[in-house]
Image: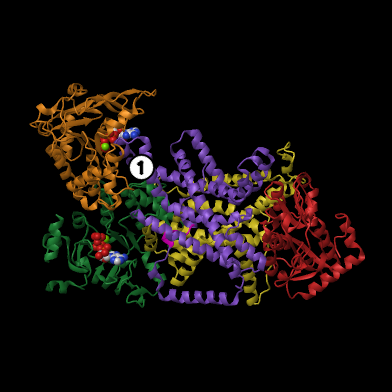
Chain colours: A orange, B green, C yellow, D purple, E red
Amino acid sequence: MPHEKENQGNCFHASNSDVSRDGDSLFMTGEAQAIAVTDLHKRFGPLEVLKGVSLTASQGDVIAIIGGSGSGKSTLLRCINMLELPSAGSVSIHGETIAMKKDGRGGLMPSNRKQVERLRAQLGMVFQSFNLWQHMTILQNVIEAPVHVLGRPKDEAIATAETLLRRVGLYEKRDAYPAFLSGGQQQRAAIARALAIQPLVMLFDEPTSALDPELVGEVLSVIRDIASEKRTMILVTHEMKFAREVSNHIVFLSQGKIEEQGSPDQIFGDPRSERLKRFISSIH
Amino acid sequence: MPHEKENQGNCFHASNSDVSRDGDSLFMTGEAQAIAVTDLHKRFGPLEVLKGVSLTASQGDVIAIIGGSGSGKSTLLRCINMLELPSAGSVSIHGETIAMKKDGRGGLMPSNRKQVERLRAQLGMVFQSFNLWQHMTILQNVIEAPVHVLGRPKDEAIATAETLLRRVGLYEKRDAYPAFLSGGQQQRAAIARALAIQPLVMLFDEPTSALDPELVGEVLSVIRDIASEKRTMILVTHEMKFAREVSNHIVFLSQGKIEEQGSPDQIFGDPRSERLKRFISSIH
Amino acid sequence: MADPAPFINWSLLALSPPGWGGVLLSGLFNSIQIAVGGYSLGLLLGVGGAFGKLYGGPILKDLLECYTTIVRAVPELVLILLLYYAGTDLINQALGLVGLPSVDISGLAAGIFVIGVVQGAYSTEVLRGAIKAVPAGQIEAARAFGMSPVKVMGRITLPAMLPYAIPGLSNLWLIATKDTALLAVVGFSELTLVTRQAAGSTKAYLLFFLAAGALYLALTLVSNVFIGIIERRARRGLVKAA
Amino acid sequence: MTIPPPDETTHAMAFTPEDLPTAASFFQPHRILLMIIFAGIVLSAAWFMRWDWLPQYLPKLGWGIVVTLAMLFSTAFLGFLFAVPLGLVQVTGPWPLKLLASGFCTVIRGTPLLLQLWLLYYGLGSLFPQFPEIRNSFLWPYLRESWPYGVAALTISFAAYEGEVMRGAFAGVPAGELEAGRAFGMSRWTVFRHIWLPRAIHRALPTLNGETVLQLKSTPLVATITVIDVYAVISKVRQDTYLTYEPLLLLALIYMCLTGILVILFRKLENRIPTRGA
Amino acid sequence: QAEQIKVGFAAEPYPPFTSPDASGNWEGWEVEFQKAICAEAKLDCVITPVAWDGIIPALTSKKIDIIIGSMSITEERLKTIDFSDKYYNTPTGVIGPKGVAFEATPEGLSGKTIGVQVSTVHQDYANKYFGENGATVKEYQTQDEANQDLAAGRLDAVQADAIALDAFLKSDQGKECCELKGNVKDDPAILGAGVGIGIRKGEDELKGKLNAAIKAIRENGTYDTFSKAYFDFNIYGE
Ligand SMILES: Nc1ncnc2c1ncn2[C@@H]1O[C@H](COP(=O)(O)OP(=O)(O)OP(=O)(O)O)[C@@H](O)[C@H]1O
Ligand SMILES: Nc1ncnc2c1ncn2[C@@H]1O[C@H](COP(=O)(O)OP(=O)(O)OP(=O)(O)O)[C@@H](O)[C@H]1O
Ligand SMILES: [Mg+2]
Ligand SMILES: [Mg+2]
C-alpha cells in the first residue's frame, strides 16, 4: 500500500486554507500553532501503539480523530498533555515545545516538571469516563483548577464557574455531588470543568461513549455549542455524523499511523485508502 | 372492549387440533395434559399482576408467551412451578393438581411441600439470567439435580450429562466454572442442566434477553433443536421471529390477562384485538 | 542500679526448667486450644445466628440483633469478665433449676465458651453478609429443581457463600487467637499470662514479652499460609479481580 | 505475606451507623412486647440487685469516662496521622519503605494489643530508668507515668489497622480522578492534597467509623497498666464491694452508651458528605 | 474418699508465699501451708490459680472452693464471704528507694507516690492514711508490678505485707534499689485481724474442718517446721 507510506508522518498544516473559518476566535490569535505534534512514537513494552504521528492544529481548528478500536486515538490524545509519555517525537503547545530528556529505559520524560504542569493548565481535557472528583460538589469541581492551579481568586472563579454551569445547563446542580448526577450531566459538568481554565485547546476523548444512547444528545449539543464559538478542539469520537458536522478537519488513525486526513466531506464523501473505506462502511 | 371479557379465563384446549403435529412425542404420551393452569390470579400487595389466566399445554406442545413488559409473563411462568405463589387458581402438572391451602393473608400456599418439590423436579426451568451455580463446574451443575434431587446414581448422571453437554456444544467446557464462560455458553449450560432431569415440560423465561446480540443465535439454535424433538415447552420470549418459527401456539398476555391466543400464523398474520395489533406493529 | 551487662539471658528461654521456654510453649498450646475451640463454637453460633437473622421469625431476629449489638458495642475485656464469672454461674444455676447436678466448668471450657460467644456474634455478621451476597437466582434455581430447603442450604447456599465469607472468617480466626490473650485477666494460663508470670519471676520483661510476641506472630503467619490455600480453593469459581 | 484487609471484619465487629435502629422500627407489636419484657428485666435488676454503692462512686466514674474518651480520641487522632503515611507508602513508596510499612502493619496486627501494651510498659519502661540520661531528661516525669505508654500502644495499634485501611483507600481512588488532576496541571503535591487524600479519607470513612468503635473497645486494656479509666474505676468498685454482676453490668451499659453516642456522631459526620449506593 | 476441694490463690507471683517455677509448679510458704491443711483435714485439694482481681467472684461462683491467698480478714469482706480463723498475721511495711530518707508516716509520705496492690487492705490503709494527707496512691493489679515500678523509679514507695516486701528486698533487684522505711501504725479495723482462709458463706462444716486443721498443725509442730524454711521469726503473730 504505497499511499500509506506517503501519509505517514505527514504534517497537517494550518487548516485555515481548508475551511471557511477566518480565525476570528474569541481567544487570542497569533502566528503560533495551538498544538503541534511531530513524529510521535509510543510503545507499551513490545507493542508500538503510535508509529510516528504528526499533527498540527491552528487556533480555532476543530479536529476529529477517528479510527478503529485500539488504533491509538486515546494514546495520541493522552500524549499531547503528557498523561502518557511519548517514546520519541515532540509536542508543542502554542509554540512552546515541551522539553524532554531520555529516561534511561528507551523512552522520554519531561525535563522540567513545572513546564509540563504550566502547559497542561492550558489544555482542557474531557475524559470518556468523566473523572469528576467524587468528593467535591459540581461547583467545587469546576473551581478547583482555576483556584488551586491558576491561582485565581475564589469569588472570581465561582462567578466564572456559575456562568459556565448555566451554559451547560447544570446551574441547579452546582451543589450536588457527582454521584447523584446522570452520566450526561456528569459529562457536561466535566466539560464545564475543562472550560473553566479557559484552555487554549479542548481535548475530548470519546466524551459520549460511556453514556446511554438517550443521554448522548445532550452532551453533543454542548460540544457543538462550544465548537461554534471557534474554540480550538481535538476530539476523539465514534459519532461519525457528529464528527462530520462539527469538525473542519478529520484524521483517520489506523494501527498507530495517520492513514488519511482531510476535510469532513473528503473523508466521508471520497475516502481514498482501502482501510478508511472499510472503516466508514462498517460504521454506517 | 367486549372481546377482552370473552377471552379472559378461556381455556386453551389440546392444541393437537390446531396444529399438524400428531403427538408422537419422544416421551410418554397419555391422556393427561402436561400443564393445566386454571383461572390463575396473582397479586403483589395492591398490584394485581395476573387477573385470571388459564392455559393448557398437551404433550409435545410448544407454547410461546408474548406480551409487553410488565404484562405478567414471567409471573405466570414462575407461578407454574410455584416459585411465585398464586393468590388464587390452580396448577396441574401431568394431571396432578398442586394442593394448595389458604395462607391466612389472602393468598395461597402449598399444603404439601413434598408434592411441590416432586412436581418441580418434572419441570426444567431456564432463567433469563442463567442462574448457574457459581461454585460448581458445568458438569457438576448438570448432574446436581439428577443426583441430589432424583437420586440417580452418579456415574449414570455423568454419562447423561456428558451426552447433553455434547449436544449443546459444551463438552469441552464441562470442567470450567460458569464465571469463565460467555453468556451464550452459560445459557446453553443452563439448558443442559434443565434437560438433565428429563423434564416433562421445559420452561424458558426470556432465555436470550440477557445476551449480547451475537450470542443470541447460538442459544436459539439449541432451543430450536429441542423443540424439533417434540418436547413440551413453554417459552416467554421477545424474539418474535423465533416464536413464530418454533411454537405451535402463541399466547398474547396483556395487563395480566390473555388478550388473544392462537396459531402463530393467526396471531402474527391476522391479529384481531387492537392491543395485539399495536404490540405487533411496535415490534416490527 | 541493676547490672545491665547480660542484657539478654537466652538460657531463660530454654525448653526445660529452669528455662521457661516449655512454659511458654504450653501456654501457646493452651491459647491455640481455646482459639480453635472458641472459633469453632463461634462458627456454629454464627451459622445459626446468620440463618436466624435472615430467615427467622421477628422475635428470633430481634433477639439475635440484641446479641450481636451487645457483643459489638461492649469491649471484649468486659464481656470476658461478665461471661467468665456470670456465664458459668448462670449455667450452673440453670442446671440446678432443671434438677441436674452443677457441672465443674474447667478454665479451658470457660475460655472456649467466652471466646465462642464473642466470636459467634462476629461470625453471625460475617456469614449473614456472605449469605446475602449469594445471588438470589442461584437459590431460586435450586428451588426450581425441586430441592428441599435443607438441600438448598447444604448444596447451594452454604458452599456458594464461602468465597464471600472466607476473608471475614479468616480475620476472625486471627482475632480469636489474639483475644485469647484477654483471658489473662481472669487468670487462665494462656500464653500472655504465663509470659507475665515468667517475666515477673525472672524480671526479664523485655525478653519474655518479645518471645511471646514472636510466638503470636508466628501463629498469625502460619495461619495466613493456610488461609491463602483455603481462599484459593474457595474462590475457584469466581472470576479474578472483582 | 499480608493479613487480609480489615474492612469487612471491621464491619462485622464494630457497631456502625447502619446498625442504628430507626425510631419507627420500635413500634411493632412484637417489639413492644420485647421492650416490656426488657424493661421488666431492667427494673427487677434495679430492684433486686445492690446499687447502694453507686452514688459514692459517681464522681470517679465520671472522671473515668473522661479518661476513656481522652484515650480514645487522642489515640485515634494520632493513630490516623500515622496511618496516612503508612497507607500511602504501601501504595506508592519505594520498596524498602513499602516493606517496612507492611512489615509494621503485619507485626502489630499479628500480636495481641495486651501484649504490646505490657511490652511497652513493663518491658521498655523498665529499661529506661537504667539509663541516667533518660532519668535526668525532661521526659522522665512523663516516662514515669503510665498513660504515655497506653497512648503509645493504642496509637500504634490504631495506626497499623487504619494504615491497612488507608492503603486500600488510596489504592481504590479511581486512577482517572488522579489523572484528571494531573491533566489540569496540578503538581503532585496538589493532586495529593486536593484529590487523593480527601478522596481516600472519604472512601475510608465508613471503615474509619468502625475502627474507632473498635478502638473504644480496646481502651479498657490500659487499666492493666494502672491508667484509671472507667474500666479501672469499675474494677475498683468490684474489689471494694465484692459484687460480681452489678458493676460489670453497669460497665457494659456505659460502654454501650458510649458506643451508641459515638456511632450517632459518626452518622452525623457521614451524612455531611453524601455517597450513593452501598 | 476425700472430698475434692479447689484452692484458689492469685495467679501472679507473690513470693515468698506463692510463686511459680519454670516447670509450672507453685511453691512458697502458703503452698506448704495449704498442703499441710489439706492433709490434716483429709481434703483432696487441687490448686487453682485465678486472677486476684476476680478471686472473690470466683469463690462465690464456685470456680474455687476456698481461698488460701494471703487474704486478710476484714469487715468489708465478711459481708460477702466467710473466713476461717487466721493462719498468719504480719505487720505492714513501707519500702522506698535507697538514698531517699523518709518515714512510713503520713507526713513522711506526703507528696510522694505510693504503690499498693489493688483490693488489698493496704490499698484501703494507704488511701486513708497517706492518700488523704497529700500522697498519690497508685493501684497495681499485682504486688510484683508495684515492686517493679518502684525499682523502675516510677514510684517513691510501696506499702505491703512486711514479709512480701522482705522477699523483694532480698532479691537481686530489691537489694540494688530499695530498703525498708519502716512499718506503719496498725489499724485493725482496716488491716484486719490477720490472714484467714476464704470460704463461701454458709459452708460451716468446711469452716469447722479448716479451723480444726489450723489448730492441729499449729499444735503438732507441722506449722513451725515448714515456716522455719522461710522465715526466721514467728509468722503467726500473736
Ligand atoms: N497503559 C497501557 N499499557 C499497555 N498497553 C496499552 C496501554 N494503553 C493502551 N494500550 C494499548 O495500546 C493500543 C491503543 O490503545 P488506545 O487506547 O490508544 O486505542 P483507541 O484507539 O483509543 O481505542 P478505543 O477506541 O478502544 O478507545 C491498544 O492495543 C491498547 O491495548
Ligand atoms: N416480587 C414482586 N414484587 C412486587 N411486584 C412484582 C414482583 N415481581 C413482579 N412484579 C410486578 O409484576 C408485574 C409483572 O411482572 P413480570 O415480571 O411478570 O412481567 P413480564 O411480563 O415478565 O415483563 P418483562 O418482559 O419486563 O420481563 C410488573 O409490574 C412487576 O413490577
Ligand atoms: Mg480510547
Ligand atoms: Mg419477565
Left or right: residue E39 compared with residue D96: right
Which residue appears at 53% of the width and 64% of the height? D254
Asked if ligand 1 lies within 8 A of label 1, the reply is no
| SS class, disc 1 | helix
Give residue A39's position: percent from left, percent from top. Answer: 25, 23
| Subunit of label 1 | D
Q: Is residue E99 magenta?
A: no
> Nearest the camera: C169 or D117?
D117
Left or right: residue C61 compared with residue A205: right
Q: Extreme left residue here?
A: A20
Q: Which quarter of the figure has residue A243? A: top left
Give residue D83's position: percent from left, percent from top. Answer: 48, 44
> Nearest the camera: E84 or E66?
E84
Highlighted range, magenta:
D14-19
> Nearest the camera: A236 or A148?
A148
- Position of the C terminus of chain A, as image quadrant, is top left
Left or right: residue C186 compared with residue E20: left
> Nearest the camera: C203 or B211?
C203
Q: Disc 1 marks which residue?
A: D194
Give residue C104's position: percent from left, percent from top. Answer: 69, 67
Amino acid type at circle 1 is His
